[in-house]
Amino acid sequence: MNIIETDSQALHLQEWLNSRVDEEIFHLNVRSLSGTLPYEYLLYSPKISRRNDGRLRDRDLKKYQHIELGGWWCSGVDPLNNYALMMWGCFKPDHPRRDAFGGRSHRQKIHKFIKYEHPYREETRAFFLLVPNRIWVKVSNRSGIPITEEDLQHPGGFWHWVWRHNVPVTIVEGVKKAGALLTVGYAAIAIPGVNAGYRTPTDEYGTAIGKPNLIPDLKHFATQGRQVNICFDQDNKPETVQRVRTAISRMGRLLVNEGCSLRVIDLPFGAEKGVDDFIVAHGQPAFDALYNTAVALELWEIKLFTLLTYPPAIALNQRFLGQLLVPEGEKLIILKAPKGTGKTEWLATEVAKAHDQERRVLIITHRIQLGEALCNRFGVNYVTEVRTNETGTLLGYGVCVDSLHQESQARFNPNDWANDVIIIDECDQVFWHLLNSGTEVQKRRAKYRFGLDRFGQGTLLGIYRWLVLSITAYLLAYWTYLSSCLPDSLDWGQAAFLALSTFLPHLVLSLLLLDIERLRPLAMPSYKRIFSWVL
């Protein structure tokens, strides 16, 4: 009914030590509980419905009966209550229960285990773990911020020093990860989930009635000029990756609005999901390198536009591609490899396989010369050779992306290529050319056909169309402002740019790259002067 026997305590300690958490941090913040004691830590909220005699209702007792089998409890100090011990925390049961609602979908047949329990009907908070003085000194040495005698005497101790001196902090998902970072000298604050750092006001039906705002614990540390780092877990599931990225952007903007300098630490894809696993597998110096190369929130968001949505299914560590085996039935294959690794040779074998199966091959490039060279390599006619060569389009043909329309000499119709093979060589260049080139292809873009000079002038219907577009743009910008974390004072330029980034991120990236190209000539003389001065 009280504290678990020594062997369970040893198991809980070993779990934390396996995450490279200092043993003294464990003893300062973690307790092993069993019997009815966990109820006192998890079901204390006055919002819980009780019987007339004050006892818990049977449904809640049944729901939480698994906690009697034991587990560990962790909490830290409360910065909003003079740094006293925080009542809120988390309990990890030794025998977790399954989610009664099947996770994010009620239709899931296999319900997930709930690894961590938090106080029932209480708002989630953040973890501020107690640390021994030697860890405090380690954080001080790393940050370069000294500890004064006044700091040592203050009842708030370490976390008051962090708050008072704007010590850089790192926000992580999960309390053990905070313990691992504190152990190696980083002031780390833990939240119980990626979306737990902010809240959106809702009505009794769960409908949002206000803008998101930081939880009070984080807002307390969101002081002007503080460097805040976000280091969440990495995951291979696309939907989880997108959810985590959205949470980073939302919480990051809220912190930036408070005056913080926000950086994002991206853990590399691999077997190690969290930062504690990463430190265990690769050591502290590897994390130091990630920390030192973390990028600002704005650059991180721009970088996302250049990343693949899905992680690679096949990764090779060899000089040449060789006989790369593509899983049967895959419809979309993206091949990325350095120059000189045999991409063209591999494509030639795939073209031969397609011809053996009596399937045609369409080769799309952004330059005519490149297309002609590839067609010659693959034994396929280029579009200009179709009418003079006896094979015609029997094996397919190569074409520049400018000619992918029915008015070109290719008389291109996408419906003619069902179940055939399409190769887009140097696809990033092809898409860039398609979106930005000043050649004939620009007349085929939607923005050319629906520009103001094409339908917004000359006719009454055209004016109506333009008004509809203008109102739509206004509504999108205003809707984005209401659903975002922008300051209360509405800046239409900022709201419009955020809407553009949300709905057309590739266009934002294109504009950025165009600006870089435009400013490149201005930068070259400065580089030359600096280089001459160094010499």
Image: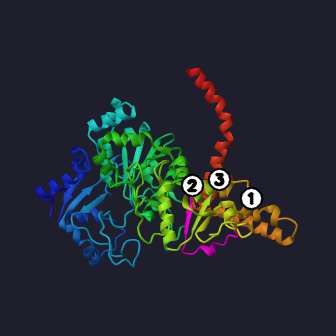
516 versus 398 height, above or below: above
Q: Is residue 366 magenta?
A: no
Tell me the quadrant of the picture where the C terminus can be found: top right
Mark 1 or 3, nearer chain start: 3
Query: SS for tag 3?
Result: helix
Residue type highlighted by circle 3? Gln
Q: Position of residue 192 (x, y in %)?
A: 36, 58
Q: Is residue 500 left or right of residue 35?
A: right
The residue to which callout 1 is attached is: 440
Residue, far right: 458
Nearer the viewer's eye, disc 3 or disc 2? 3
Q: Nearer the viewer, mark 1 or mark 3?
A: 3
Reply above or below: 407 against 139. below
* Residue 336 appears left or right of 139: right
The x and y percentages for residue 8 are 15, 58
Residue underneath mark 2: 426
Determine whether 68 is above or below 157 in the image.
Answer: below
Q: Residue 395 shows which numbered tag?
A: none
> Which is nearer the eye, 86 or 294?
294
| Magenta range | 410-428
Question: Mark 3 or 2 closer to N-term?
Answer: 3
Q: Which residue is mark 3?
A: 369
Q: SS of the residue at dot 1? A: helix
Q: Please report the residue visible at 49 percent of the width from the left and 57 percent of the height from the top.
A: 308
Query: Residue 88: x and y, percent?
Result: 33, 57
Foreground residue, 392 or 74?
A: 392
Residue 66 at least partly seen? yes
